[in-house]
Amino acid sequence: MDINILIQNHFLCTGMRKIELEIIALTHSITQTHSYAVVLGEVNGIRRLPIVIGGFEAQAITVALENMRPSRPLTHDLVKNMMKAFGLELQEVIINDLSEGIFFSKLVCFNDHDVIEIDSRTSDALALAVRFNCPIYTYESILENAGITMDESAATKEPAPESFVATPEASSDKNNLSTLTRDELQALLDEVLENEDYMKAIEIRDEIKRRKK
């Protein structure tokens, strides 16, 4: 049986409508220090689902979204490699519960014969979803309870997510970067990559790209 049909049949018995989401932005959280908020948007819709995540997971998501190549595998890269080595594919991620402000998720995986569900923190699930390039879903009830509805005019004005990370310090950092030469920027980029500071690397890379234009 086709694996997609197998998974569809697996969830038909729940009677719960799944809503597909996509990552819209990743920003510094204004409610929690040293945390980030990943903003998920309803595909072909105007609702948004913000979820607070830690800095490590934010970096892991950013590295995959920006197609950066770490000098050594990050934890989520290791998990992906192990899953593939054992013939396990991640088919989809489902944000399946919300309790006391905490989102819970599951990884829907498959091997040659079976569909396997694995409980996961939502931040880890998202970091794996972008690595496997698999869809992200939630249920209508969760999106209705925790989602934010954008008016259509505001939704159409949202910028394309070319750079997914924005922090309160971004503007001052960009001003500092603008004073550096191309060679100094490249040297700084090499340094931050060596230190595995991928969020800073994205800012420097964007500045170099801007100079090339």
Image: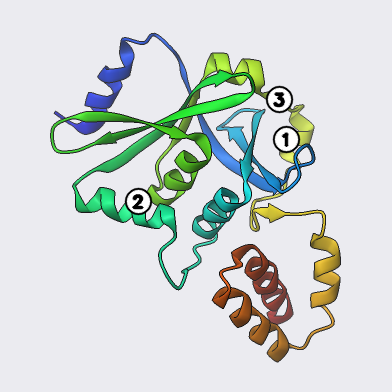
The local crowd at label 3, few if under 14, some if 14 to 19, many if 20 or more residues have their Cα within 10 Å, is some
Q: CA distance from mark 1 to mark 3?
A: 11 Å
Q: Along the polypeptide, which appears first: circle 1 or circle 3?
A: 3
Type of the residue with mark 1: Ala
At 78% across and 33% down in the image, what residue appears? 153
In the image, 186 versus 191, the foreground residue is 191
Could you say whether the residue bearing mark 1 is in a helix, strand or loop?
A: helix
Q: CA distance from mark 2 to mark 1?
A: 35 Å
Q: Is residue 128 left or right of residue 30?
A: left
Could you say whether the residue bearing mark 3 is in a helix, strand or loop?
A: strand
In the rendered image, the vertical position of residue 118 relative to residue 82, given as above or below: above
Q: How is the image coloured?
A: rainbow
Image quarter where the N terminus lies is: top left
Report the disc number at residue 148. Answer: 3
Q: Is residue 169 left or right of residue 210?
A: right
Could you say whether the residue bearing mark 2 is in a helix, strand or loop?
A: helix
Tell us which disc is closer to us: 2 or 1: 2
The local crowd at label 1, few if under 14, some if 14 to 19, many if 20 or more residues have their Cα within 10 Å, is some
Type of the residue with mark 2: Val
Identify the residue under disc 2. 79
In the image, 8 versus 36, the foreground residue is 36
At 19% across and 38% down in the image, what residue appears? 111
The local crowd at label 2, few if under 14, some if 14 to 19, many if 20 or more residues have their Cα within 10 Å, is few
Identify the residue under disc 1. 155
Q: Along the polypeptide, which appears first: circle 2 or circle 1?
A: 2
At 72% across and 48% down in the image, what residue appears? 34
